[in-house]
Image (spheres, helix red, strand yellow):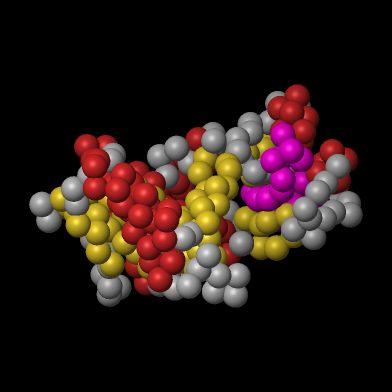
Amino acid sequence: SVPRVLTCLQLHVSKKVLVPMAEIQKLEFDSDALGIPVAKLLAQTLTEEDLQLSLKNASQRGFRLLFWSTSREHACALETYARSLGHFCSSKVKYTAHLNKSLLSALQHAANETCECDVEKVSGDAISADLLDLSLLAGRDSRFMNDPNLSYQQFEQIYSSWMKNSVKGSAADVLLVAKVASKLVGAVTVKANRAQKLSTIDLLAVHQDHESIGKALVLAAFRWSFAQGFTACDIVTQL
């Protein structure tokens, strides 16, 4: 099969000869959830030749999928190159909100005007069917859903596992849910980097009948982060 490229860049590899390559790190969670060996390229920049060599070597070592995080400018150039070879490509982007009282106040005003819901923290290890359904909504436009090399079952497995691990506290430091008339209509997970005083919103899902609830969930995630003493919160989304 021909090597294929996805997301930032997410790279599908085929078996070739062993050659020197950039350092890679196996991703245990993704490997277990998808049922295929998955790794991450650690180099910040690569030439077209380096990328091709890395794909060949990774495949020889048994990896079937590689993730690579790099600058938008660098990714765009290599995506163009990858598309010219017939690879499938997609990208994601990271937004950073710098947290302060003025921002929270403005967001609170916007949320009050558009949504009426109760947002609360989930405690305990039990996971409901409603939460699992929301995990799939969180990934409906994701690279895993759009990747022609992955099955729907693999997509379902990685997002349901992600939500289960968030409930347990291994994939997220807090899970916040939104309810309307006691019905679960949205959820957001937040991961903390205390050393950098930074948090990241990972999963964000809102029921299609209550899309305005997203503002309240993002605000709740920001408020939780600000209360922890964090100065910024990242939000990563698919383009």
- Name above or below for residue 174 compared with residue 179: below
Q: Position of residue 14 (x, y in %)?
A: 72, 42
Q: Is residue 19 magenta?
A: no
Q: Position of residue 72 (x, y in %)?
A: 69, 41
- Name above or below for residue 138 compared with residue 30: above
Q: Please name the residue shown 67% across and 43% down the image.
A: 9
- Name above or below for residue 224 compared with residue 142: below
Q: Please name the residue shown 83% across and 46% down the image.
A: 46
Q: Position of residue 174 (x, y in %)?
A: 38, 68
Q: Quadrant of the N terminus?
A: top right
Q: Please name the residue shown 15% across and 50% down the image.
A: 180
Of 99 and 195, nearer the camera is 99
Of 46 and 36, nearer the camera is 46
Of 104 and 202, nearer the camera is 104
Q: Is residue 89 among the parts visible in the rendering?
A: yes
- Name above or below for residue 157 compared with residue 127: above
Q: Quadrant of the C terminus?
A: top right
Give the side of residue 74 with respect to residue 202, left or right.
right
Q: Please name the residue shown 60% across and 75% down the image.
A: 195
Extreme residue in the left direction:
181
Give the side of residue 155 with respect to residue 209, left or right.
right
Q: Is residue 71 magenta?
A: yes
Tally of marks: 0
Q: Is residue 189 among the parts visible in the rendering?
A: no
Q: Position of residue 40 (x, y in %)?
A: 68, 56
Quadrant of the rendered image containing residue 41? bottom right
* Stretch in magenta: 54-76
Quadrant of the rendered image containing residue 210? top left
